């Protein structure tokens, strides 16, 4: 293996190992598994130290170079990271050494921008080189669709189709997708999120659509995961106080566990993370797994106010299991138990119900003037649980991730805090823009016909 050319292997272990470019453009492995790096590259502590004075994009460059620097020229990678990360990453002090990292300043105001913008640009680069074209097909319950649509907007060799459940996304979420146009096509489905997902899955498996080169952009793509290691390095580098044995606790509000997998990989790359607090909403299959060692997915998933985390069987769980030496297939069956002691050493997991999520939004504002939305509130509440139930030293650096902007959830904030959160520039003017989208019944033949007409 040469430097900067990581090999990726499927978690199901039955497919050929591939390069980063292949893993990125394929999405899912042919055996149904998820691609993971065979060897995780490491940073020296001096390299991590040097990030303290680096802008965000330079850390993204360093991470990209470690994983796939052998597949893309430096100048090209630098151009991509500078273009993708042109917004702020605020670190807000709450009390003592406890911080919230706001990952909500991208164009669609959720942390999904970090991954989507990098993945879109990388796909565009690799496709151009092989004169290829792709159609990205995505089902969304809200944030993914808008992040993907914005990230791929205007890329000349990629077409985007997003399916969303007509009645399950907020007006603001819908407008973030439907006001773009160009290469972005949006379909409102008369059905539920699961129905959208089912249509998309069928299209991927349909040989008659092979000629279109359909690809997926959801969090199973390794191209989304690697960019999600970067903000962990960034948060630590900016907040560490310089002692050689510095370390950090991160709290991660989790749904499909892509965010968390980014953090776990960052730790394997050398980042001194003492603990990950993995906070879920009432979908508590993972905290139960950490407790008991038995994994049982939840079907159907539970509806909570942190809607982007309403996941009963997180798609990245096989990756997490693989990181701890185990093996799990895409259905959630464990073929080899991971090292649960090692897992519990790195991870503390807790489920936060809606009542506590709301109370935390209220308390955080009253006590600290900290404005949280439901997802970040689950993370912050999880961190408080951990601090109360373990011997965390008073000055310990802790960083809780805020994964969306409060202005994406104006009704909830108004209900709890009685004011309207200020709109970030990215969401301004959205209400007046013109929407364009098609309507679709939950009918595969109708969907297929539509695809074949659009992409001949
Ligand atoms: C997607 C999402 C999450 C969950 O992230 P995962 O990587 O799926 O665990 C949390 N918060 C917000 C706002 C999201 O959009």
Image (spheres, rainbow, N blue to C red):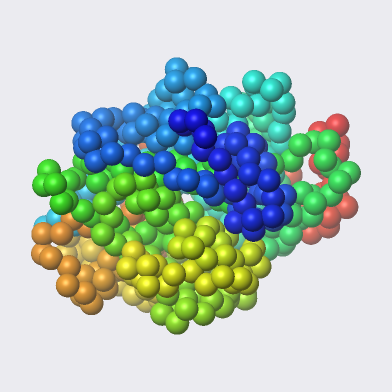
Instruction: Please say whether residue 396 is visible from this viewpoint.
Output: yes
- Front-most of 207 and 63? 63
Instruction: Please say whether residue 173 is visible from this viewpoint.
Output: no
Height in image: 124 above or below 112?
above
- Front-most of 208 and 160? 208
Q: Which residue is farthest bottom?
A: 292
Answer with the quarter of the image where residue 180 lies.
top right
The residue shown at (17%, 46%) is: 240
Height in image: 452 above or below 205?
above
The residue shown at (74%, 59%) is: 198
Answer with the quarter of the image where residue 20 lies.
top right
Count of marks placed on residues: 0
**From the image, which quarter does the C terminus lie in?**
top right
The residue shown at (27%, 45%) is: 235
Q: Position of residue 345 (x, y in %)?
A: 32, 68
Answer with the quarter of the image where residue 253 lies.
bottom left
Left or right of 118, for residue 51: left
The residue shown at (84%, 42%) is: 209
Q: Which residue is farthest front?
A: 1
Q: Position of residue 126 (x, y in %)?
A: 61, 27
Height in image: 312 above or below 66?
below
Left or right of 29, for residue 208: right
Left or right of 91, for residue 205: right
Q: Which residue is farthest top?
A: 75
Left or right of 400, for residue 119: right
Q: Position of residue 151 (x, y in %)?
A: 54, 35
Q: Position of residue 19 (x, y in %)?
A: 60, 36
């Amino acid at each position: 293996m040469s430097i900067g050319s990581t090999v990726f292997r499927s978690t199901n272990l039955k497919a050929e190992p591939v390069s980063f470019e292949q893993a990125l453009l394929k999405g899912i492995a042919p055996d149904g598994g998820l691609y993971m790096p065979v060897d995780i590259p490491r940073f020296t502590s001096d390299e991590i130290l040097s990030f303290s004075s680096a802008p965000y994009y330079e850390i993204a460059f360093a991470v990209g170079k470690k994983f796939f620097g052998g597949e893309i020229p430096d100048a090209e990678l630098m151009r991509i990271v500078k273009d993708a990360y042109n917004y702020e990453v605020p670190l807000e002090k709450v009390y003592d050494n406890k911080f919230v990292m706001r990952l909500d300043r991208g164009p669609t105001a959720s942390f999904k921008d970090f991954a989507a913008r990098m993945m879109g640009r990388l796909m565009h680069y690799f496709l151009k080189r092989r004169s290829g074209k792709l159609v990205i097909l995505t089902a969304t319950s809200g944030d993914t669709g808008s992040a993907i649509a914005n990230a791929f907007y205007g890329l000349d060799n990629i077409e985007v189709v997003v399916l969303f459940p007509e009645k399950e996304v907020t007006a603001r979420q819908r407008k973030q997708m439907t006001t773009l146009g160009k290469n972005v096509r949006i379909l409102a489905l008369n059905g539920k999120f699961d129905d959208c997902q089912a249509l998309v899955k069928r299209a991927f498996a349909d040989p008659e659509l092979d000629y279109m080169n359909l690809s997926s952009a959801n969090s199973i793509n390794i191209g989304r995961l690697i960019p999600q290691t970067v903000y962990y390095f960034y948060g630590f580098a900016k907040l560490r106080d310089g002692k050689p044995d510095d370390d950090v606790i991160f709290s991660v509000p989790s749904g499909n566990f892509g965010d968390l997998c980014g953090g776990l990989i960052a730790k394997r790359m050398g980042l001194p993370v003492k603990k990950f607090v993995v906070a879920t909403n009432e979908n508590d299959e993972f905290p139960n797994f950490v407790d008991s060692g038995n994994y049982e997915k939840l079907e159907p998933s539970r509806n909570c106010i942190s809607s982007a985390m309403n996941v009963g069987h997180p798609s990245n769980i096989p990756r997490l299991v693989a990181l701890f030496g185990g093996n799990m297939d895409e259905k959630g069956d464990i073929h080899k138990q991971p090292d649960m002691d090692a897992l519990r050493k790195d991870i503390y997991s807790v489920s936060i119900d809606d009542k506590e999520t709301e109370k935390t939004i209220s308390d955080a504002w009253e006590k600290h003037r900290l404005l949280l939305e439901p997802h970040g509130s689950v993370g912050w509440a999880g961190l408080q649980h951990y601090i109360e139930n373990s011997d965390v030293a008073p000055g310990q650096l802790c960083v809780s991730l805020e994964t969306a902007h409060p202005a994406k959830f104006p009704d909830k904030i108004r209900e709890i805090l009685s004011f309207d959160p200020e709109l970030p520039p990215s969401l301004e003017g959205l209400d007046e823009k013109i929407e364009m989208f098609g309507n679709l019944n939950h009918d595969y033949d109708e969907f297929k016909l539509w695809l074949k007409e659009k992409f001949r």
